[in-house]
Amino acid sequence: MVKIDHFEYLSEEEKRLKEDRDRTKYWKKWGPYVAERQWATVREDYSADGDAWSHFPHEHARSRAFRWGEDGIAGVSDTHGFQNIAFSFWNEEDDYLKERLFGLSNPQGNHGESIKEAHFHQDNTPTHSYMKMLYKYPQKKFPYEDLIKENARRGKEDREYQLIDTGVFDEDRYWDITIETAKETDDPEELLFRVTAWNRGPEPAPLHIIPQVWFRNCWAWGHETPDKKPSIREISETTAHSKHYKLGDRYFQLSPSPGVGPSGQDVMPKLIFTENDTNFKELYGGKNEQPYVKDAFHRYIVDEDKKAINPKKTGTKSAAWFAFNEGGGVAPGECAVVRFRISKKYDGYLDEEEFDDIIEKRREEADEFYYRISPLPMAEDLRNIQRQAFAGMMWTKQHYHFIWDQWANGDPSQPPPPPDRKAIRNANWKHMHLDDILSMPDSWEYPFFAAWDSAFHCIPLAMIDPDFAKKQLDLFTREWYMHPNGQLPAYEWNFGDVNPPVHAWATFRTFKIERKMYGRQDLDFLERVFQKLLLNFTWWVNRKDYDGKNVFEGGFLGLDNIGLFNRSEPLPTGGVLEQADSTGWMAFYCLCMLNIALELAKHRRIYEDIASKFFEHFILISDAMTYKSGSDNEKSLWNEEDGFYYDAISWGGPWTQQLPIRSLVGLIPLYATLTLEPELINKLPSFKKRVDWFIANRHDVAERNMASIRKRGKDNRILLSLVSKDRLEKILKRMLDEDEFFSEHGIRSLSKFHQKNPVAMDVNGQEFKVSYISGDSDSGLFGGNSNWRGPIWLCVNFLLVESLQRFYMFYGPSFQVECPTGSGDFMHLGHVSEEIQHRLQHLMARGDDGRRAINDGNDLMDFDPHWKDNLWFYEFFDGDSGRGLGATHQCGWTGLIARMIHDTGSLSCRLPQTPRTPSTGMNHYFDDTFTRHLTSDTGRRGSQSPHPKMRRSSTSRSLGARSDFDHSANGDDEDKVSVGNSVVTENAEREKERKEADEHTAHYVSEQLSRVRSHQSVDFEPNGDEFEAQLDEQ
């Protein structure tokens, strides 16, 4: 449980997490594990040329059975993706049933693949006891062709053409469709679904809501016997019964929906059935083994093909068709509501009032859970951003299934794949056998894992579900993921590519976050992952330090187009690229392993020897970063004249040429920073002896290019760092220069200096050039859908912030730098790290003018009441304006904003466009906020108004008659109802526990605010106990 003021209290959601952790109840068995895009993934590609985008395009998805997964809108499934529940819609204008989210393939987009929809992940808890998603569905014909043609017309220099640019939302002619899922109080396998579709337009409009329940096709490939084929059949007008040999029996139980037409009659669902099999006749002109195929519901509803569905009302795919089209459809400002449940028991009807009460109760519990994660007062806008960041992290959990042998060699019942296919990609990853729930970088654009993305995901994940975060980190080091040689798989397009080595950092941070927030110390996890990372570290040393010089190559290392050349391919100049970032990453990796070894050594002294190994290895890497052989006339990766690190091309011996590009490559060496705590060193005699020997005998190696290990810093700490104090000042002078790296919204990936001063090189008549580009990429490197030549990326900023905090732990408040450069304002490095975090938060936070930088001045997104509080979590951001770019649901590493808000968003964050304000000037704000949070029960729950009563059908068994309709559900009623009027009465003992927890929370918040009032906040306090191995408190 989250510990506040040293008091432990389990919220209802934390109780569920504990039950899941103790394996008394399987709360995570069902979750949002259905992909938003399965088509055009590498797993579904069986082509001869490896062109996944062309082999399985979007237009095939409605008719072609997937081999390795499923996709859908707001999809829910079991942890193995056997049974799936998702939603489809039709507006009577589209040519196709809206069964999945649309986007452009990589060749179609002017900046690579890109989703062209408007949906938002609004809420989700770690056990998925409550989930909420908003989908904005146009009432006009969906502009598929317009989006394809206009983006094809645009070039790399142009902006992407998005759905909101098409005019399809003009006059508010769209549906706000909110999809909620909840679980029963005591049974994690009882699932409740509610769809509420609001007509935002000026006229009545028809809408068809078609929830679907189906099984992933496991029977067509020849690996299962026919008796294991699942089935779904109708057993009553409103219920279907499903059977699966592993999942058992389930009932798809539906409730009639309140009518929307003049008759007032309920809308009854029509159950329809087909098989989840490919329509060979439609796609290839072949013959179907039986007539009922995957696209039957589209053909039946849209094309009015009455023979498309199975008249026997059975199959492996089912749907419930609700048609809200009487009298022209739903009136303006009104809503259509659909309720159903997936249950292990058959009741014959739904008690709608009880149904709505359960959903409301789960929502309240979600509010309480998230409030206790960040209990300090903060602006409601920041709390909303953090909540949606967490929600997105949960919604991007997906079932990932891949078995190399079956994928490479084909299936027994299918034609063999082309013989050349095996050599196209991933030929050396024959051991892979994956069937897990993974955190994906983006729910649509990147429906596959990426190793370094996943590491960053685990930081915000550890705040709310450390068990899931640890599982992610552990999986990548298991023998069915990690290559036998020790390499971690990168991503499915090329498992053998190289991502930055951040796994050790994420492992230690996750361990420390869980210990600090939840009071649990999982040493077994830490030791198990550490043992496997020893193999990975050795792989790096053996494979990426070809000459054994401790200067590393590495390839693109996630920074796609940052250099002059494609860093994953041989250089056109010949020679080897010695990378400042790769060497910096390895020094960082070394220190992270040292940190873990010291932590483990507190419990098992044998790890002192391993800690000594990483200590000395770091010294050698840091020495090689400047002096590769020790001779005086050699060139290094450090440029003294520019005060910056650069990549260099080496042709052997003294023949080296630096590439003078001021990019993130030269900032990454700052990551390699660690403070050693004297109390801990004194408790580890073997390690201390080795450190003392090195200080006495090899100090010359360290002192010529790194912070002196003889000099002790704040609190007598020792600093290990690639950069000396002098170099740190020089690098920060550039990094904090607003004409170079320091933008209003964070640190740019390339200095703005190169906007007017590009770097170019002519090689055999071909020009290679790097210039500052603040927005989308102007090149096609790595798909062209990301850009590291100017934009802001949260992940690398996050590591820079942590590095500055480590430096502050050593240098203390006396070491100050000008921030911004040239401003005349000086601050210590702790405050510099806060300033960067504030600027990053300003990407999303609403400014004084009501605008968010990510929205780029779009009035609809900034001011419309139905849009302005919903956010897209972009992949990266324009280096000048902060405009959101790339993937729109990159909740993985952009979700790090949740951690930043937790650390600095409450007591110290200033709004965009607000000057830095002394803490004394904030007293009134804190008094007001503190009072509101302590006196309002709604503040404790994190919401100021509960959901009102929902529309219910006239056949509701619980009421016997139609419920009154409450217009406040549309946001028109300003009357607030106290959340304390809970729909489920809690026992007195539980209420007593909660009251005591609230008192401790109030005491904790009061203490923090008192610190601010008394100016103690000026003495910045970094989370050192989360960064470094320290002596345990007694």
Image (cartoon, rainbow, N blue to C red):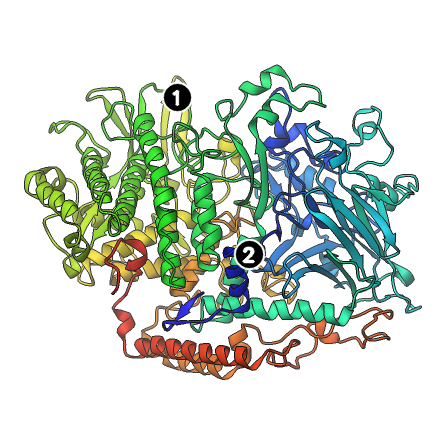
Query: Which residue is depicted at the point 44% across and 74% down?
Result: 377
Which residue occupies the foreground of this view, 554 or 540?
540
Residue 98 visible? The answer is no
Q: Rounded to the nearest whole Å, what is the CA distance between mark 2 and mark 1?
A: 40 Å
Residue 679 in percent (x, y) is at 17, 58
**Along the polypeptide, which appears first: circle 2 or circle 1?**
1
Task: Answer few, some or many: residues within 10 Å of disc 2's Cα (few below 14, many 20 plus, some between 14 and 19).
Answer: many
Residue 124 visible? The answer is yes
Residue 144 in percent (x, y) is at 73, 42
Which mark's residue is nearer the viewer, 2 or 1? 1
Q: Residue furthest left?
A: 696
In the displayed structure image, the side of residue 224 where residue 899 appears, left or right:
left
In the displayed structure image, the side of residue 283 where residue 393 appears, left or right:
left
Query: Mark 1 sits on what residue?
Result: 570
Residue 184 in percent (x, y) is at 66, 63
Query: Mark 2 sits on what residue?
Result: 855
